[in-house]
Image (tube, rainbow, N blue to C red):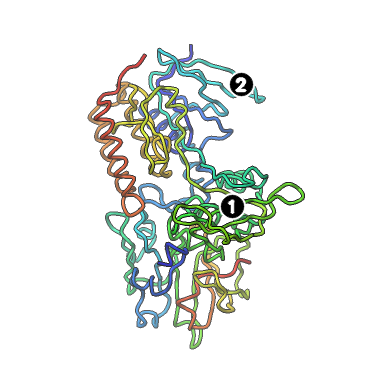
Amino acid sequence: MLERDVLVVGAGPAGLAASIEAAKAGADVLLVDLNMKPGGQLFKQIHKFFGSSAHRSGTRGFDIGLKLLEEAKEAGVEIWLQSTVVGAFPGNLIAIEKGVDGGAKEVITLKSKKVIIATGASENVVRFKGWTTPGVMGAGAAQTMINVNHVKPGKKIVMVGSGNVGLIVSYQLMQAGCDVVALIEAAPKIGGYAVHAAKIRRAGVPIYTKHTVVEAIPGEDGTVCKVVIAQVDDHFNPIPGTEETIEADTVTIGAGLKPATDMVKLEKCQLTFNGPFGGFIPLHNDKMETSKSGVYVAGDATGVEEANTALEEGKIAGISAVESLGLISPKEAEKRRIEIWDRLEALRMGPFGERRQQEKDNILKEYEEKIGTAVEMD
Amino acid sequence: MALINDGYLEFEELNKLQKLPSEERYAKGPVAVIECVQEIPCNPCEAACKFGAINVGNPITNLPTCSHDKCTGCGVCVSKCPGLAIFIVNKAYSETTATVGFPYEYMPTPSEGMAVSAVNRKGEVVCDAKVVKVVNPPAFDHTPVVTIEIPKEYADEVRSIKRL
């Protein structure tokens, strides 16, 4: 049977950072990802990242991705692409549907001493009349089209949602040569960073707060040709009589993300509901260990944040995994964790971060109260 | 507040939230105008300035402050700011005109001498402009800094151009 010290699921910033830390400490690391390329969302991020100098701020996301892939290669991380975890069984056994050449799949059972889950998040949808019409898509899908596949999703875009995803993808759609004819936000104010909003305003994008999409109307070819928007009341219900029709061929929806918890459920890790973090998330301690001993989590799967926090959490998970394997001393591991938690605290400051810091503290506290010490379940 | 409701800063709002260069400083030539007004965890502008004019300090959510007397208006910070929120304003360009330098990451990149339409923070065209300089070295990592010449009275208003 195939055996590894550490299995990392998800090759985004959290999974890559965890793999690099674990491999550098001498662990045999297998990193699996369902996509055709590693890097998670990093290779879609063509903008320069915020953050501190310690987080390579001012560097474009895809360059951070390239750097991480290089480090993973140097550290000897083995990567399986187009591969999916399909089962978890007693005795630390994990079934993986491995992608092999020619698009075929092969199911392989792996015995892994430690598991790090870094499965990221998935996009939320907004339902409205005509929401299944071709031309309606997630903002993340549109971003993949332009920045990975170099295909324009349409000519005239209506973006729904003013969080950082909606704002940044609007900017990038214009960079790709599309026109963003409206950005719609149901809340009374813009959700993302003002500087992101400012740059799309300068480029002439009208921002409609307190508005929602009522309908996407298909044209003769069956794809979106008109979009009806309307003002909303305090309960986010459209106000009759306020409808406006906008000519557009694409509706992109940036209505937030929710943590992808399939794998933590498979491992039977204890979950908690956390609204600000996007939904159900696994409880974890300051080692990023879940309720199940030897199973760690990191990144958006623990609550939706951003790439820098994902990277740092990934490092903690990697360090904790190799500490429990005896590859680094508890003293060394603790020292490094403290440094990283300090950096995380700096990232979770200010009006956009404070809430996340509070919620993270609550999760660690809830773990202490409900779990205390991770248990062997097998 | 226009900023969080509509996505742009009114000049008065900016003036309250950031220390802007004095008219005396403007009279001496190009200077950085930092339009970063939200406490977000970000500090590359601080390291970008080799003259030590920009300070963020600890915690990194502090708003950047610019010592305008140390600033030479070189424009390196403009290309480094991930928020594209720094501009170089030269109100001493000529008797009647000023220049505004801004980051411009759309294709095609404007070329020097080109006639363009200058826009304000809301994206409204306010006047005609001429591109006087385009700086785009590898160190700017694909964020060209474009400088346009405009009538002096629009120097506090113009922040970009209509996309080409």
Residue A309 appears left or right of A121? left
In the picture of the structure, the residue carrying the numbered disc 2 is A105
User: Given the current orientation, which residue lies at the most extreme bottom position?
Assistant: B95
Q: Relative to the observer, which residue lies in front, B163 or B112?
A: B163
Q: Classify the position of the C terminus of chain B by image quarter.
A: bottom right
Toward the right, the furthest residue is A220
Q: Chain of mark 2?
A: A
Tell me the quarter of the picture where residue A334 sits.
top left
Q: Is residue B137 above or below residue B13?
A: above
Foreground: A357 or A28?
A357
Quadrant of res B39: bottom left
Q: Residue at x 39, y 83 (%)?
A: B27
Identify the amino acid type marked 2. Answer: Lys
Residue that sits furthest to the front in the current view: A240
Q: Position of residue A122 (x, y in %)?
A: 50, 38
Which residue appears farthest toward the top when viewing the image?
A1
Which label's residue is closer to the chain start, 2 or 1?
2
Q: Chain of mark 1?
A: A
User: Mark 2: which secondary structure?
Assistant: strand
x then y, percent, for residue A8: 44, 27
Closer to the camera in the image, B144 or A297:
A297
Residue A147, how many percent across, how many down?
59, 47
- Badge 1: residue crowd in 10 Å (few <14, some 14–19, many ≥20): many
Marks 2 and 1 on same chain: yes
Q: Quadrant of residue A18?
A: top left
**Which numbered dot is residue A87?**
none
Q: Is residue B71 left or right of residue A210?
A: left
Which residue lies at the image location 59% right of the left edge and 33% below the top edge?
A36
Q: Amino acid at mark 1?
A: Val
Local secondary structure at mark 1:
strand
Place of residue A177 in the rendered image (x, y in percent of width and height, measured from the top left): 64, 57
**Residue A214: which disc?**
1
